Amino acid sequence: MYKYYVTARMSAQEQTNGGILYSLPTVILKICTLIPLLFLWKTIMNAGAKVEMSLPQMMTYTFLSSILSDMLVVKTPATGWLSEGVLLRLYGRPFSVLGQLVAQTAGGWVPMLLMYSVPVLFLAPLLGVRLIPASPAFFLSLPLCVSLGFAVDFLFACLSIRIRNFSWLIDRVRGAIVVILSGTIIPIRFLPFGIATVMKYQPFAALGGSPLSIFVGAGDVREILILQIAWNLVLWPAALFAFHKSQERMVSYGG
């Protein structure tokens, strides 16, 4: 396990090699996105919009989605592992390629958690956000969400191997599909025309929207956890099988 810890630490250090000021624009952008979004929801719901969540729940949902964004929708370097030379670096080390990707990704979360998520927590009372989970099941749902996020990301990475020279397009399509269907920005229960009833059973709904719903008390905890466990059991074997089959098709710059 030590080698994975070292990989994660190197990944975290890599994010700040240019200095803390290098990451400051990202922090400012996140804050400038979060605050207007909170006030937008506040304005809409105070205007009488009928939704299935109270204003405090919606404020907490949006706030938590921002500070945990990297974990709620996992994105590893794997999508660009052919065009950006990631593949050669991973196979040049004597341990699991997928394990390296997990460690590298998790390590990359640390700088933004320290520079953005933790400081912004002190703004919660000022913004009227209550950061007390409605159910302790949130602490089980979040790891299940992260685990499934890696499986989904690996499947898209394998798709980029199959469809060569389209990694950028796949990454853009993946970003649009996952963010919308995971409910991290707009809760799935808000979808109109009865779509929410069907969409809550698709795999992306078991990502970010699930732990957020449990945290604010806006979902059936038992149903959410069952779906998250079920999709993990389905997609992880699929991701491992797809990766095993895709290795034969790998071609990276440099060999």
Image (cartoon, rainbow, N blue to C red):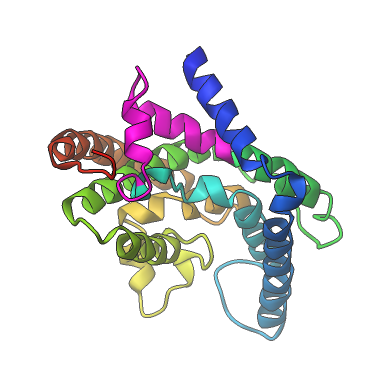
Tell me the chief SS of the magenta region: helix
Tally of marks: 0
Left or right: 109 as drawn, with respect to 19: left
Assess whether residue 86 is covered by the magenta stretch: yes
Q: In this view, does 43 lie above or below 102?
A: below
Residue drawn at x 75%, y 45% is 20
Q: Which residue is drawn at 17% across and 33% down?
A: 244
Q: Which residue is drawn at 38% across and 32% down?
A: 89
Front residue (pair 94, 198): 94
| Closer to the camera in the image, 252 or 180 | 252
x, y (%) of residue 82? 30, 46
In depth, the one of 232 and 224 nearer the eye is 232
Q: Residue at x 17, y 51 (%)?
A: 162
Q: Is residue 134 left or right of residue 240?
A: right
> x, y (%) of residue 239?
24, 39
Magenta highlight range: 81-108
Answer left or right for 126 relative to 161: right
Name, please, the residue furthest toward the top.
Answer: 2
Given the current orientation, which residue lies at the most extreme right position?
Answer: 126
Residue 165 image offset from top left, x and y in percent: 24, 59
Provide residue 122's location: percent of width, then percent of height.
84, 49
Along the line of sight, the residue nearer the viewer: 55 or 71 = 71
Q: Confirm whether residue 131 shows in the render.
A: no
